[in-house]
Amino acid sequence: MLSGTQLKLRRFLSRLGFHSEWYLILLAAIIGSLTAGGSIGFNWLIRIAEKQSEIALQHSSIWLLPLIPMAGALVCGFLVHYFASEAKGHGVPEVLYAIIKQGGRVRPRVALIKALASAFTIGSGGSAGTEGPIAQIGAAIGSTFGIVLNVSREHQSTLLGCGVAAGLSSIFNAPIAGIFFVLEILLRDFRVRTFTPIVIASVISTGITQAYGQAHGPIFAVPPELQQGEVFNIIEMPNYALLGIICAFVAVGFTWMLYKTEDIFDDWKIHPVIKPVIGAAALGILGLGAIAVAKQSGREMDYPPFFGN
């Protein structure tokens, strides 16, 4: 059954020449635009939190460094526990869970809570990336449209995928990566009816983000001297193969350690709001250790390099 809003939207699009499921194209464009705004706002929140953390550190003793990530973790734990428990975690696994177990439905409030909690965590020094949070933020935005319009389960997942692709594309300035991440990892669906709206959402989100000055250069730029002459030699192929094998083992080990640590924290019988604070305290102590080692080697370090995004 179609909701009244969905029927009106389809009739309106039909007058414009769009028929059948082409209304998804318009929704994808809207989701891409809103997710771009969410990405810009998310980055803005992170910068504010980072600035406040720097100011706090400048006006206090270096030995109080652990208190900064602990404060951010306390706010994060409070927001997630009391307002949106789904916002707990890395982001991408929660999106997968929503697709598989919840029919692609994510509560709208998750977008706001995830943005605030992640901004406080990253801005105060928490060693977390933006890809997981923006994926869940975009998922919540896309899912909300599906919930309001009461679309089918299949279209619900497609709209959620539009939000995820738009979020990843805008945060990394990489629309192709956002598109194929959603199609290969989340939806595993390459049909045109799924592919087209996700491409639309991703490209529009990237364009808006670039227009507002959020675009950035490559994360790992190739030095000028390597851009001239013969860059690649087939004799080096075994080195790249070995590098791939090493990275695979490191990735497996890191993933195992991450989930093992998460299981340990889940088993602790303490209040959920306090658990992130304990992890942040450990991070702060590691930060003090890094600064101490740097000073011993004659290098100045005001802020640990592994703090923040």
Image (cartoon, grey):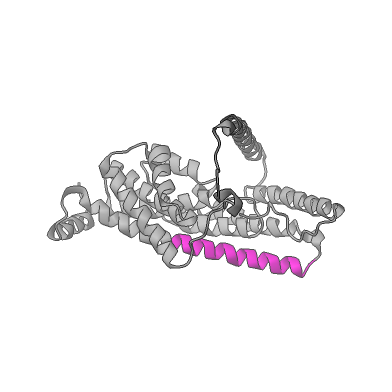
The image quadrant of residue 108 is bottom left
| 282 relative position to 47: left or right | right
Q: Height in image: 282 above or below 185? A: below
> Given the current orientation, which residue lies at the most extreme right position?
296
Can see residue 147?
no
Q: Residue at x 77, y 58 (%)?
A: 301
Point out residue 5 in the picture as x, y percentages from the top left corner: 22, 58
Nearer to me, 191 or 72: 191
Q: Residue at x 56, y 56 (%)?
A: 117
| Quarter of the figure that contains the C terminus | bottom right
Residue 49 is covered by the magenta coloring: yes
Nearer to me, 229 or 115: 229
| 87 relative position to 281: left or right | left
Residue 180 is covered by the magenta coloring: no
Point out residue 137 in the picture as x, y percentages from the top left corner: 46, 54
Magenta stretch prevailing secondary structure = helix
Nearer to me, 17 or 246: 246
Point out residue 131 in the picture as x, y percentages from the top left corner: 51, 50
- Part of the protein shown in magenta: 37-60
